[in-house]
Amino acid sequence: MKWLAFTLAFCLFVVDVYSDSDTIDWCYHDTSCDDRTWPVIAANFCNRSRQSPINIATADAIEDGNLIGFTITNFTSTSALVDITNTGKTVKVNIKKGVQISGGGLSEPYDSLQFHLHWGNRSTKGGSEHTVNGKRYPMELHLVNVKSRYNLNTSLALEDSTGLAALGFFIEADSSITTGEFWRNLTAYLRQIPLAGDHVNITHDIPLIGLLQGVDLTRYYRYLGSLTTPTCNEAVVWTVFKDPIRVSPEMIDLFSTELHINNTIDSPLMVNVFRNVQPDLLVTTQREDTTDDSVKLCASLALLALSLVLSSS
Ligand SMILES: *[C@@H]1O[C@H](CO)[C@@H](O)[C@H](O)[C@H]1NC(C)=O
Ligand SMILES: *[C@@H]1O[C@H](CO)[C@@H](O)[C@H](O)[C@H]1NC(C)=O
Ligand SMILES: *[C@@H]1O[C@H](CO)[C@@H](O)[C@H](O)[C@H]1NC(C)=O
Ligand SMILES: *[C@@H]1O[C@H](CO)[C@@H](O)[C@H](O)[C@H]1NC(C)=O
Ligand SMILES: *[C@@H]1O[C@H](CO)[C@@H](O)[C@H](O)[C@H]1NC(C)=O
Ligand SMILES: *[C@@H]1O[C@H](CO)[C@@H](O)[C@H](O)[C@H]1NC(C)=O
Ligand SMILES: *[C@@H]1O[C@H](CO)[C@@H](O)[C@H](O)[C@H]1NC(C)=O
Ligand SMILES: [Zn+2]
């Protein structure tokens, strides 16, 4: 747990995340504006060659000893989550200034801005953006961070090929799990934001780390890619964690059943909000820690030897 550097937050500044893409009329649902059309309707930059998401072929990932664990700051703050918004494309949670990440093979610290999610149609229909050896998880959480030197100015960050650091967390459905109180309390807000544009303040004490339980922050894939929505700027250092967050299927289903894509209740439900995978890119990862395996092997050999000794005596 050495990589954890916890501090508590009492934050003053609310981060406002604007979107460069507001002027382009893109969508997930309609063939006139879905992701197949983005390279045309959002030619800058969705038509380029460093695009996200991708399929991660684990056998092709190159080992990189520089990919150490992350140092996270103020992830235990119970007041860091500001508000939750139905954007018509996703559910977005804004994060107060003071939450930070560093390490993780990043060149410098980054400030956390917001997280949002991608999903399919209920827990049974995959909706993660990244896939691993072709597997699509039910959901994916994206924690978006901007290089601290830009002081939360995202337009400056988008001009830098590593201006943003996005952390991708897969969400797996697990019916054997009693979903943690933090996920329950977060998803309880969904029924308060059924229509695009709806937003409410977060009043529950939900620390970011409480939503990421079960994820080892030292095990991840790394590649250089882009925003996964127009305007698809190629300004993102991607980190995709190997361990999924486990959440009950009922909780996952809420995303596909409570939210609408427009500001009328008869507009379609928000489902299948993910971009299809783009051409492969170079992916790196940690050197597999073979000590653990060899220790296990030695232990089982020792047990075997012991049982042989015992049975022959
Ligand atoms: C963590 O949050 C507290 C309270 O907002 C703040 O004083 C502190 O500077 C933050 N830490 C960092 C590294 O930003
Ligand atoms: C992408 O579209 C832009 C704008 O039309 C164009 O300038 C650029 O050459 C295109 N890039 C590629 C790789 O096709
Ligand atoms: C989503 O799933 C529900 C229930 O299975 C189904 O009725 C609905 O048509 C699906 N929606 C889409 C867009 O596939
Ligand atoms: C971000 O930086 C750009 C370029 O320096 C500047 O024009 C813009 O006003 C800044 N935006 C904010 C919100 O400070
Ligand atoms: C939400 O929080 C903001 C900032 O603290 C505050 O100005 C606003 O009144 C709150 N809205 C509601 C509905 O409580
Ligand atoms: C989460 O919600 C439950 C029930 O609604 C409540 O008892 C609990 O105090 C909440 N937890 C937090 C951290 O707000
Ligand atoms: C959603 O509303 C916008 C304008 O408010 C409209 O242009 C668009 O066609 C609507 N989309 C759907 C799917 O109803
Ligand atoms: Zn995303």
Image (tube, rainbow, N blue to C red):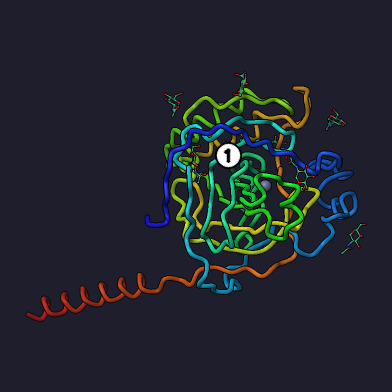
In which quadrant of the rendered image does the C terminus lie? bottom left
Q: Position of residue 301 (x, y in %)?
A: 25, 77
Horizontal placement of 33 versus 120: left or right? right
The secondary element bearing badge 1 is classed as loop
Q: Nearer the viewer, residue 14 or 306?
A: 14
Q: Position of residue 119 (x, y in %)?
A: 65, 43
Q: Nearer the viewer, residue 124 or 68?
A: 68
Classify residue 50 by image quadrant. Answer: bottom right
Q: Residue at x 12, y 79 (%)?
A: 309
For disc 1, the marked residue is 97
Mark 1 Cα-neighbour bin, 10 Å: few <14, some 14–19, many ≥20: many
Q: Residue at x 63, y 54 (%)?
A: 165
In which quadrant of the rendered image does the N terminus lie? bottom left
Q: Residue at x 74, y 28 (%)?
A: 196
Q: Position of residue 298 (x, y in %)?
A: 27, 76
Q: Nearer the viewer, residue 149 or 260?
A: 149
Classify residue 18 by image quadrant. Answer: top right
Q: Amino acid at mark 1?
A: Lys
Classify residue 190 by image quadrant. Answer: top right
Q: Residue at x 43, y 43 (%)?
A: 7
- Cβ(mark 1) to ligand 1 < 8 Å? yes
